Amino acid sequence: MPSRPDPLSISRRRSWPLVLLCAVQGCERFAFLAMLPLFVPYAQERHAMSAPTALMVVAILQALSYLSGLPGGWLADRKLGTRASTMLGALFLALSYVLLAINLSSLFWPALGLMVLGHSVFRPGLHVLIAHATGNDEHARERGFLWHYLATNLGYAAGALFGEWAHAARGWATLFCGSAVASLLSAILLGIGLARLQIDGNEPDTNGANLATASQRGNMAAVWLICLVAVVFWLTTQQAGSSLAVFAAMNTQQHITLSGRAMHLGPGHFAALHGWMVIVLLPVFLHLHGRRQESRASTASLLIWGYVATAAAFALMTTASLLGGDADRVSSVWLIGCYLLLSIAEILLAPLGMSLVTRLAPHDKAARAVGLWFASSAFGNGLAALLALGWDRWPHHRYFAVLALVSLAAAAALMRRRPPMA
């Protein structure tokens, strides 16, 4: 068996390109999240849209941004190359925010179109570049995507805070100008990162590594399986903003006493708690991941445990519903425990799933594989919308039990293919 390269040596050689690429992702997420939570009031105030129409536009915008990763990945693989497509996507995104800042009705739809086009080529290309920056070593690649996910969540949090401040203090133009500046900064950092990657000669011989364990066709079949199963991950992730938010508002005690002081807990507090749990747990997981030895579990095994943790989270909510949450209010401890398990599951599934997809995909199909991963998000969101129709028709325990069962089914599907994917 060939010796594994020392992850620390890989980290030293490639750390700066990876840091720059993580900063690129953080800036892009900052720009998008500064705008997204306030898009509906913006569309109502400046473009005379009704709330339902604006909500529909947001849903379609996000769905197209994820689905367009498939043709965007094909362009990156076959025509543009990952470097050019990622840079082009960053520039398209910056231009889209500039058009929104100009605030002309005639530029509104072109701006949204540019945003979809920018995401379509930016997302697949950037994730392939991160895979390149970490090389062929499985351990280093996992750590790279864990750092990337931390940067993503920090960008989310900072962008949302900036958007609220900019709109309240300076108005819509300042908000969108801030997003445009963040996107331009991502393009500048990307240019620096690409130069470093060029020096490093980072294009990894992934075909050789893949062919040592399975044929390229078998690897793509495994990629398809991971992405199909990921639909369940995205379905359950969406519950934080839908069923769990409603449960927090209607079926959870909204006061908690800490150090003799009563505190109010609303749905927004629980959602923020979930986000901060992920941010706090990620460095802990990175530390534990760095201490793993040769006997560590495979990436596929960690994905299986992620779906098991998801099933446990909704089994917890099923129990809470049976103990009174179906018709009355239960302790907030149930929901906090659910969010903690979902945060652990998200850390196991989102960055490590992307790491495994990029590792298994043949070199000439890497961006398309990433696009497929993001397309699964669109289908998961759609499935979440369909399942939401059962919230008022079913008792809560049945709704949560369905989510627990589909999560276990996802774990079982991966377990059957674990040896080829490990």
Image (cartoon, rainbow, N blue to C red):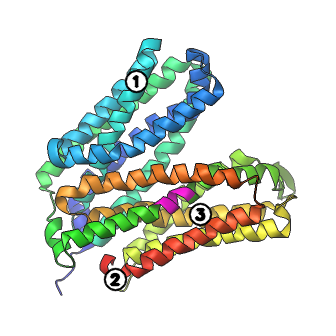
Whether residues under marks 2 and 1 lie with C-beta atoms below 8 angstroms apart, the answer is no
Residue tagged by mark 1? Answer: 111
User: Could you classify mark 2 by the number of other residues whose Cα lies within 10 Å: few (under 14), some (14-19), or many (20 or more)?
Assistant: few
Q: Earlier in the sequence, mark 2 or mark 1?
A: 1
Residue 98 screen position, x and y as percent: 39, 21
Is 218 situated left or right of 115 in this image? left
- Using the rendered image of the protein, determine whether residue 372 is visible from the camera's viewpoint: yes
Looking at the image, which residue is at 16% across and 57% down?
Answer: 202
Q: Secondary structure at mark 2?
A: helix
Toward which corner of the image does residue 309 lie, by quadrant?
bottom right
Q: Disc 3 residue type?
A: Leu
Looking at the image, which residue is at 63% across and 73% down?
Answer: 312
Residue 32 on the magenta span: no
Instruction: Say which mark, if any, is on residue 419.
Output: 2
Instruction: Say which mark, if any, is on residue 410.
Output: none
Above or below, 399 against 94 in this view is below
Residue tagged by mark 3? Answer: 342
Residue 107 screen position, x and y as percent: 41, 16
Is 190 situated left or right of 410 in this image? left
Q: Secondary structure at mark 1?
A: helix
Q: Give the CA distance from mark 3 to mark 1.
A: 35 Å
User: Could you classify mark 1 by the number of other residues whose Cα lies within 10 Å: few (under 14), some (14-19), or many (20 or more)?
Assistant: many
Residue span colored magenta: 231-235
Q: Disc 2 residue type?
A: Pro
